[in-house]
Amino acid sequence: MDSTSLAAVTSWCPHAPLQRVSFDWLAGVELAVLRLDLIDPLISGNKWFKLAPHLHAAAQQGARGIISLGGAHSNHLHALAAAGQRFSFPTVGLLRGEPQDTPTVRDLQRFGMQLHWLGYGGYRARHREGFWADWHARYPEFCAVPEGGGGLFGAQGCTTLVELTNEQLAVLGWPDYHGWWLAAGTGTTLAGLVMGEGGRRPVYGALAVPLDHGVPEQVQALLTQAGLANAGYQLIEASRGGFARRDAELLAFMEQCEQDSGLPLEPLYTAKALMALREAISNGLIRPGMRLVFVHTGGLQGRRAALLAGV
Ligand SMILES: *Cc1c(COP(=O)(O)O)cnc(C)c1O
């Protein structure tokens, strides 16, 4: 019917401000933040950049809408549903577990996303052959986007972050910078930065999940696919014991950073990434005089659930 609405996405090039930020623990390291949390009032974070190539491909195929998967706090589904609302294309979300009422889920509904709760077993079946055939039969002309908008497409969407940053360097008065610092979950965004850099400036990924959960292998596979097998990047354990694990020290650090800089953070990714940066500065991996770009990957919508839980 109206593939034109999905096509409208392709002409949107969001702007993310690049801002100087200072913390007392930077100890001579200069930091600028690429504010992906500010690209749009509704659509936020790295999830938009990972989605963009998927949406462009879907538009090109004349798809009518998008179907994807995630959990009850998913930043990915949130960005997708928000984009659907913003550009008037239908979205379907397949959710992990039993029906839950979270701030994220309420937003998804408000944005008009059609939700289906798959249970835990049903969600695990997403890798099974025939899984998508059933959903395609139910939603013909809908394009499926993998969980989190990952894969090579997702990484390619993040290569533009390099340009977005470089065109704003003059505003900071920076002649250049020495590398990137960001939170990594699947490492797709990190891989996109490495691709955008062509292996030039190093990219440091503060890993929000334990190192032995397969992310290094995944990143390597993505970069090999992109022809950049030995490119400059480093993954640093930053999970503090597990994904979504929060402790008092992290929360106090987060609050202090927010007070000192005015930068809004959340505990799963961005606060952990900054804490890992403080550590890297104190152990000498990052040295005084280095200029780094920290990518604020967003995720602030997910913070509401943590606040409700008394965190
Ligand atoms: C998903 C997410 C990440 C991790 O992105 P990957 O591309 O999976 O590494 C980091 N920060 C926030 C806020 C996210 O929502």
Image: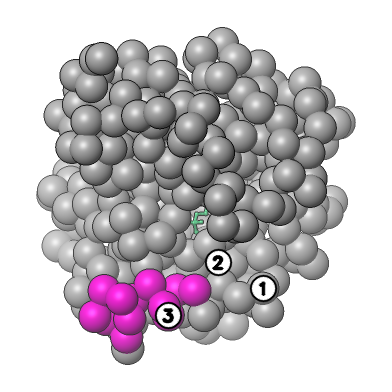
Q: Looking at the picture, which amino acid does disc 2 mark?
A: Ala
Q: Report the Cα–Cα distance between label 2 and label 3.
A: 16 Å
Q: Counting residues from the N terminus, which is met first, the one under dot 2 or under dot 3?
A: 2
Which residue corresponds to mark 3? 220
Residue that badge 1 annotates: 213
Residue 306 in the image: above or below residue 129: above
Q: Is residue 249 left or right of residue 303?
A: right
Residue that carries the numbered disc 2 in the rendered image: 206
Query: Mark 3 and mark 2 in contact (Cβ < 8 Å)?
Result: no
Q: Is residue 39 magenta?
A: no
Q: Nearer the viewer, residue 216 or 301?
A: 216
Residue 281: x, y in percent?
A: 53, 74
Q: Position of residue 193 (x, y in %)?
A: 31, 63
Q: Which residues are magenta?
A: 218-229
The kind of secondary structure element at disc 2 is strand
> Quick one: SS at disc 3?
helix
- Amino acid, disc 3: Gln
